[in-house]
Amino acid sequence: MTQDTAAVAELTRRLVSIPSHADEGAAGDAVEEWLRAETDAAVRRDDHGNVLARRGEGAASLALVGHHDVVDPDPSQVVSGTPDDPDPEYRIEAREGRLHGRGTADMKGSLAAALLAFRDADPAGELVFASFAGEERGGVGARAAIDDGFAPDYAVVGEGTTGYSGPDTTDVAVAHRGRRGSTLTAHGTAAHASEPDAGENAVYRACDAVDVVRDLPAPETTVLGHQVRGSVAVTGIEGGSGWNVIPEDCSVTVDERTVPGERVPLDRVETVDGVEWTVDQDLPPMACDDADFADAALAAADAAQTGTPDHVVKPHATDAGWLAAAGTTCVVAGAAEPGEAHTATESVSLDVLERCRRLYRRVAERWPAT
């Protein structure tokens, strides 16, 4: 293990050891303390738990972005206490060149790589670091920071892009899908099931609305020559109060994977009598709007590894969606591989973490272009 790999491994282990599924405050403290001790940057902690730092000067700014909260650990990832405890001891193990534990891949490993790159880079312009709280709760930290004026010109968001174009290759995502979760609520009139015509069956109305959803086309678009295709699917239905009662209410859940600039016209379900549509969550998609920046990030990724990376599309929503919607030009690049995040076997390659450190530093030293 090289000295640089050992450094990113040590910092990752330190961050992962701090529970941050129920309360990410202590993890934010650790990030803030490290920045104050290791850099000369202007560091601040906002009222939402976000950790922000700035160094360097220039007409344009580049941000290295991550988050320090995690999802609830699996029981196997806890040494003492239970996953329901706010402060259990997390299990962290190093095996065969990988670090195993909750948050290693999503995304404290890439966060550690970004911290080291932020410290060590000779930035080409103003360099910003941001570690957001509440990413796993719908991007609440990023949204709050944006509302408070956080607006870098460019950003590299460190969510996982390793293994997309090929094994052991860290790619650069120029787009990702969003997610809109909706509920269709059908209202009817209750009656005794022996006299069904005396009521209005809410389940039948809900089924009519499901037929509308079934016929809606999936959205699609193109970003920098790459196709981004969304989807829409009914994921649940619930209604009725008894086997002998005509149901007066029925609800249907719909999962829609959105693409930049397009939405499925789900409002069409409201053409069915008694049906209303409500949006429960809308995580925005992301599209990079600057081909030069996308190419610069790809060149940095190429220089950081022996494999040949590519521009890719990421299927999952990230904080890049909120930033892009607010006007920041974004790409996504990080260590996590498909199938690692949020699992009982979550792990990250230490060599890939060091690769990401090199990638982030190279972007910071060559962008914004002058």
Image (spheres, rainbow, N blue to C red):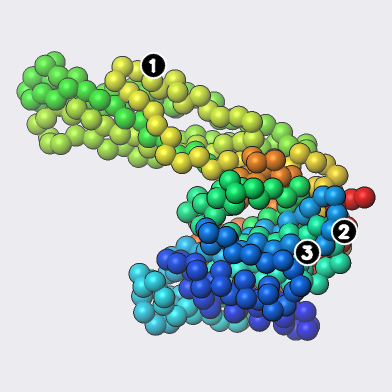
Residue 335 point in image, percent of width and height: 68, 64
Of mark 2 and mark 3, the one earlier in the sequence is: 3
What residue appears at the point 59 percent right and 64 percent down from the top-left corner? 45
Q: Could you tell me which quadrant the N terminus lies in?
A: bottom right
What residue appears at the point 35 percent right and 25 percent down from the top-left corner? 276
Residue for badge 2: 124
In the rendered structure, find residue 55 and report the number of the disc placed on it: 3
In the rendered structure, find residue 271 and report the number of the disc placed on it: 1
CA–CA distance between discs 2 and 3? Answer: 11 Å
Dots 3, 1 in contact, CB < 8 A: no
Of mark 1 and mark 2, the one earlier in the sequence is: 2
What residue appears at the point 55 percent right and 50 percent down from the top-left corner? 144
Along the line of sight, the residue nearer the viewer: 68 or 206: 68
Along the line of sight, the residue nearer the viewer: 148 or 75: 148
Q: How many marks?
A: 3
Residue 20 shows up from this direction: yes
